Amino acid sequence: MNRKVVFKTYTQDQLSFLPPSYDDLVPKNHPVRIVNTIIDQVDISTLEQSYKGGGTSSYHPRMLLKVIIYAYLRNLYSSRKIEQALSENIHFMWLSGQSKPDHNTINDFRGKRLQENLKKIFHQVVLLLVEQGVVSLKDIFVDGTKIEANANRYTFVWGKSIKTNKERIKKQLKELWTYVEKVYKDEQTIPNAPDFEAIDADKIEATIHQINDALKGKDIDKKVKQKLNYAKKNWPSNMAKYQKQEAILKERNSYSKTDTDATFMRMKDDHMQNGQLKPAYNIQASTNNQYLTNYTLAQTTADTTTLKDHLNNHIENYNQAPETLTADAGYGSEENYTDLEDKDITAFVKYNYFHKEQLDKKRGKINPFHPDELHYNKQTDTYYCPIGQAMTNIGSYKKKTKNGFEQEIHRYQAQNCKGCPLRSSCHKSKYNRIIERNYNLIRLKAKAKTLLTSEQGIAKRKQRCWDVEAVFGNIKQNMNFKRFMLRGIDKVNVEMGLIAIAHNLNKFSLAI
């Protein structure tokens, strides 16, 4: 028996007595409403003041801010795709009040207007979340991750290459002057030698002129003449180029020509899993309860030198220091421990070989020749090697780190290692063994070890893994943000801020 098929009414041109409201089409707990509510509470007066006025009317900055944040929450990062969404997506149309700024307006607002203002807006959003009781600024977890820059991977400048090229020019200039001295060896007067130490573009040009003048009227070797012509034509301009590149590099070892603020870094998440070098930024993040509480951008590959500035940025923006800070071994330096101690922050920060120490202790594996295991007599300031020979203090010296932090190192030397049956296991030096001790670092590491192995420290170490690293996982995998859209550290800072706000508001929308 065949049954009659009944279809629902389908009439495209059906008129309504009352047209539907966009508000009726947006669910009550939808993330777009969270973005709208939170951003409505943010003070954007400084952003509004950046508009000069005059001319045609401008789109309201609060509307543009809401649209861009919601776009990032929905994994839309292209200004053209955001423009398209404003005409096709009901949530964007509701949020914008049916305003339809084009992609140029969106891009200019994101890349220019937000540069001086977004960080303040981000911190206001965090404080609103603190008021909601989902975030605490007293207890933070810190880690870093690298995100690829919007730059060509194959156009780069390396600091080592610049240094090598400069040294080669310097060496060849010296060789040319040696030739001049050889020409004048039978004459009474020899021209004064130029300064080859502090060489720049102008000095190179002057030195080449000096060599040419010295060789005027002389029978010059054909190859030397060719080399002088080449040097005059190329070396001053090359040196000027190297000087400009060094000014861009500053303390870095590399940069990309298409985004000079980006540094080449080894990326763990490369699709080939072989750790390729790519232009990138080192993102430093603080989290609590998997919410981002602060972010800063670093142009260095190592995390060690970034913690102090990152922490100062937190204090500057919130007018308070956290009570506790948890981080992995990448941050465990004497400078960082000292800074945290000065700020009265309880630091659960691992140091190098912390895990190895714990594993060796568990296995009962102790190296009796390690300086930490040698007996020390504090009264006589003397160490004793495993066979009981005294190692006396032979002086101390101070050295500075790249950041300018001063360390004091004390040195101790054994009296006579000759004929010692344990020498091959103790040290490989041809002379009597010398050990170096940094007592401030030893004290700080002992303090860190006590905290890390406490019940609270073990809990913090476990929490760090799923707190801060989960945020990076969400940004890179769920939000599919693995490469910046904008170029230059100022614009990249804006984009990172948008990602951070979007991450926080999306998590908040899922929690309520």
Image (tube, helix red, strand yellow):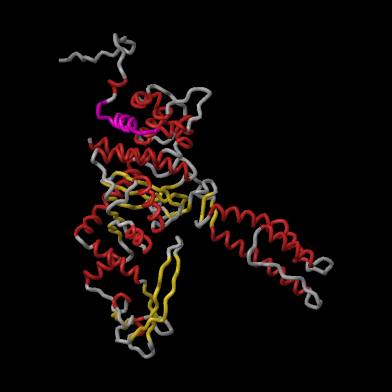
User: Is 35 in the magenta?
Assistant: yes
Boundaries of the magenta span: 27-44
Residue at 41% x, 51% y is 282
Quadrant that contains the N terminus: top left
Q: Is residue 493 magenta?
A: no
Residue found 69% across the figure and 56% down from its top = 234
Percent coordinates x, y for residue 391 in the rendering: 35, 83
Quarter-of-image position of residue 330: bottom left
Q: Nearer the viewer, residue 264 or 305?
A: 305
* In-image side of 350 versus 182 (left or right): left
Residue at 79% in and 67% down:
214
Left or right, residue 293 beside residue 64: left
Q: Left or right: 494 with respect to 208?
A: left
Residue 203 vertical placement versus 36 (above, below): below
Figure label count? 0
Find residue 404 and report its horizontal and vertical position in percent.
Answer: 45, 62
Furthest residue toward left: 1
Q: Nearer the viewer, residue 196 or 264?
A: 196
Determine whether 163 is above or below 53 in the image: below
Q: Nearer the viewer, residue 433 or 172?
A: 433
